[in-house]
């Protein structure tokens, strides 16, 4: 995604040199007005512009640019900030320096919050940190009437990753039901994205446990659930596939990485 943005920005610079246009730039950070913590994946839209929407990173940081026409180059920029669970705001930003934006939680909206997977096994801390980028976890009230609804599962993917992370044209294989030892009955939907950016993984799995009101989102080349309930994670790095196993730990109340399984 960064490569694509760099190419686009480069083209904008070239155009600006051969015309009277210029590039208007704004950046800043978005925080929760109550907790004062940064908010990830806030959609930042340039109002009345055709530029692709950007999303804040894990530190709440955003960076947007647009091509402004006219001999005197109008540097005005109005941005909208939108995320489920918060009130959308529209703000006119004059200065190109970093801006601080606060979003107020919308008490009338149901927030789907997916947090990084919390690995309890620190014997292989580096691997646990690595997996946290590819496993998202959330504890919410699951709508049991939508356990077979394609769009319901897809909503969790969009909460875990920016919409531009995958091509919107995707193919869903199937929904399965698995009974995972010590964890319970899970509904799993497998998505395959034919065009994906930033990594070699092409599948996303959404696993819902309605009895615990928990959801896991796995972004891997593929996952396999064995008869003993071990979840095998296969990760693709430039055509070379590696494997890691996780099992549910009743003691830790979470899935734990088996350090000996890394290969």
Image (cartoon, helix red, strand yellow):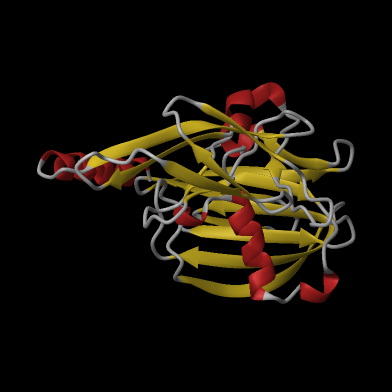
Question: Measured from the top left, where is residue 151 in percent x and y?
Answer: 64, 72
Q: Is residue 110 left or right of residue 158?
A: right
In the image, 163 versus 136, the foreground residue is 163
22 relative to 216, above or below: above
Look at the image and tell me whether residue 21 can be seen: yes
Q: How many marks?
A: 0
**Residue at 76 percent of width and 61 percent of height:** 208
147 relative to 69, above or below: below
Q: Is residue 166 left or right of residue 87?
A: left
Question: Measured from the top left, where is residue 201 in percent x and y?
Answer: 46, 52
Question: Measured from the top left, where is residue 128 in percent x and y?
Answer: 63, 32
**Residue at 85 percent of width and 63 percent of height:** 210
Q: Is residue 57 left or right of residue 39?
A: left
Q: Farthest residue in the front direction?
A: 72
Q: Is residue 21 left or right of residue 135?
A: left
Question: Measured from the top left, where is residue 167 in percent x and y?
Answer: 42, 62
In the image, 166 versus 258, the foreground residue is 166
In the image, 105 versus 115, the foreground residue is 105
Q: Farthest residue in the left direction?
A: 18
**Residue at 82 percent of width and 67 percent of height:** 143
Answer with the quarter of the image where residue 97 lies: top left
Answer with the quarter of the image where residue 108 lies: bottom right
Look at the image and tell me whether residue 224 can be seen: no
**Residue at 21 percent of width and 43 percent of height:** 21
């Amino acid at each position: 995604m960064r490569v694509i943005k760099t190419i686009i920005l480069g083209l904008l610079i070239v155009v600006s040199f051969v015309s009277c246009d210029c590039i208007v730039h704004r950046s800043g950070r978005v925080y929760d007005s109550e907790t004062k913590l940064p908010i990830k994946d806030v959609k930042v839209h340039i109002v009345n512009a055709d530029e692709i929407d950007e999303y804040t990173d894990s530190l709440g940081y955003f960076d947007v640019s647009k091509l402004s026409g006219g001999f005197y180059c109008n540097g005005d920029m109005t941005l909208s900030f939108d995320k489920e669970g918060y009130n959308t705001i529209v703000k006119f930003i004059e200065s190109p320096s970093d801006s601080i934006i606060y979003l107020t939680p919308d008490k009338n909206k149901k927030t789907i919050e997916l947090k990084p997977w919390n690995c309890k096994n620190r014997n292989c801390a580096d691997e646990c940190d690595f997996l946290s980028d590819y496993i998202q976890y959330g504890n919410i009230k699951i709508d049991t009437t939508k356990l077979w609804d394609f769009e319901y599962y897809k909503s969790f993917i969009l909460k875990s990753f920016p919409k531009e992370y995958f091509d919107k044209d995707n193919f869903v294989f199937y929904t399965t039901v698995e009974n995972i030892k010590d964890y319970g009955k899970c509904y799993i939907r497998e998505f395959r994205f034919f065009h994906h950016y930033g990594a070699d993984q092409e599948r996303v799995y959404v696993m819902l446990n309605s009895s615990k009101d928990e959801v896991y989102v796995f972004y891997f080349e593929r996952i396999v659930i064995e008869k003993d309930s071990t979840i095998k994670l296969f990760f693709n790095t430039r055509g070379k596939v590696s494997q890691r196993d996780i099992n549910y730990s009743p003691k830790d109340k979470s899935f734990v990485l088996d350090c000996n399984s890394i290969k």
